[in-house]
């Protein structure tokens, strides 16, 4: 983590979609700064256990795993309750779980639309709904929603994802207003392209949708939108997340933080 630090000792965090990619990097950053963490997401059970055990051993914190399916509200509620019961509190909720599908709107499968809206937006609502009462009782909480540059601008062939991420920003603002007097903040982080398993899958899907090569997708579609012409690094994203999770971020509320090399500046 280099110079990126925050005093989160004794805090408790949930990070959804944290068994790989951005979520795993966020969970590791929070743990490295003292927070107990509950991991959530899909993947091989053995690999997930290795990740959980390594975070616990490397950082001297308590790390748990909960297999909540983000399509199922009851499982999301149980995930929040499990974290609260295990840690005795819940200070940080990072809503990161997400899926993607790339297709022209007239060809977009209805079931893919429903799944993307459910996991990328509705699941965020359910996690917040159950976390807020805990945070209100503590008189402190940090809700950080991983949106996307696509919460601020659109791209073709991503109708469901763009709609969901725009919705996340609206939800973020509403929750921020409702909870501002309870010591709770709610913000969104809007990364550009980070090289993750999800983005690797998008490269293949976009190449198919546009009839171009993978290299052309990276050069002419993805990184053409980012003036820096490079993928966002995990540590660059974690810097803003640690700020928002810490006491230093207490007055940042209802905001969307673009971490995308200037993509949305134009």
Image: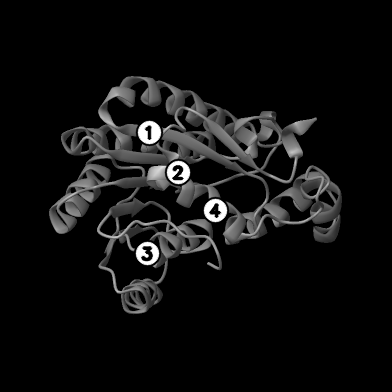
Q: Residue at x 32, y 77 (%)?
A: 53
Residue 32, quarter of picture? bottom left
Name the quarter where the C terminus is drawn: top right
Residue 207, labelled with which disc?
none
- Above or below 213: residue 142: above
Task: Of the two numbered discs 3 and 1 on the same chain, state the one appearing first in sequence.
Answer: 3
Task: Of the two numbered discs 2 and 4 on the same chain, state the one appearing first in sequence.
Answer: 4
Estimate the x, y position of residue 180 in percent, counting from the top left: 34, 24
Task: Of the two numbered discs 1 and 2 on the same chain, state the one appearing first in sequence.
Answer: 1
Task: Of the two numbered discs 2 and 3 on the same chain, state the one appearing first in sequence.
Answer: 3
Q: Would you name the residue on which mark 1 appears? A: 185
Determine whether, in the image, residue 186 is placed left or right of residue 22. left
Task: Of the two numbered discs 1 and 4 on the same chain, state the one appearing first in sequence.
Answer: 1
Q: Would you name the residue on which mark 4 appears? A: 239
Secondary element at image label 1: strand
Estimate the x, y position of residue 166 in percent, counting from the top left: 56, 28
| Callout 1 touching callout 2 (CB < 8 Å) | yes
Please tell me which residue lies in front, 44 or 92.
92
Q: Would you name the residue on which mark 3 appears? A: 31
Report crowding for label 1: few under 14, some 14 to 19, many 20 or more residues within 10 A (C-alpha): many
Q: Would you name the residue on which mark 2 appears? A: 244
- Rounded to the nearest angstrom, the CA distance separating label 4 from label 3 is 14 Å
Q: Residue at x 39, y 47 (%)?
A: 246
- Rounded to the nearest angstrom, the CA distance separating label 2 from label 4 is 9 Å
């Amino acid at each position: 983590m280099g110079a990126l630090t925050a005093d989160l000792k004794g805090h408790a965090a949930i990070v959804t979609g944290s068994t790989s990619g951005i979520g795993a990097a966020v969970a590791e950053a929070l743990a490295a700064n003292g927070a107990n963490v509950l991991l959530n997401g899909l993947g091989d059970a053995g690999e997930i256990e290795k990740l959980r055990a390594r975070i616990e051993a490397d950082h001297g914190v308590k790390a748990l795993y909960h297999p909540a399916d983000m399509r199922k509200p009851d499982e999301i509620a149980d995930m929040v309750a499990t974290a609260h019961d295990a840690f005795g509190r819940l200070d940080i909720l990072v809503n990161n779980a997400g899926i993607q599908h790339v297709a022209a709107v007239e060809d977009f499968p209805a079931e893919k639309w429903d799944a993307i809206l459910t996991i990328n937006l509705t699941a965020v609502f359910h996690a917040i709904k159950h976390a807020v009462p805990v945070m209100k009782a503590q008189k402190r909480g940090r809700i950080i929603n991983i949106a996307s540059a696509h919460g601020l601008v659109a791209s073709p062939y991503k109708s469901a994802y763009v709609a969901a991420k725009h919705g996340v920003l609206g939800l973020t603002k509403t929750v921020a207003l409702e909870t501002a007097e309870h010591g709770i903040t709610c913000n969104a982080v809007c990364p550009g392209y980070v090289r993750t398993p999800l983005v690797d899958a998008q490269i293949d899907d976009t190449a198919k949708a546009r009839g171009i090569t993978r290299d052309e997708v990276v050069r002419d579609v993805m990184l053409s939108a980012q003036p820096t012409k490079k993928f966002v690094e995990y540590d660059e994203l974690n810097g803003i997340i640690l700020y928002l999770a810490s006491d230093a971020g207490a007055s940042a509320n209802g905001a969307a933080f673009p971490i995308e090399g200037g993509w949305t500046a134009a």
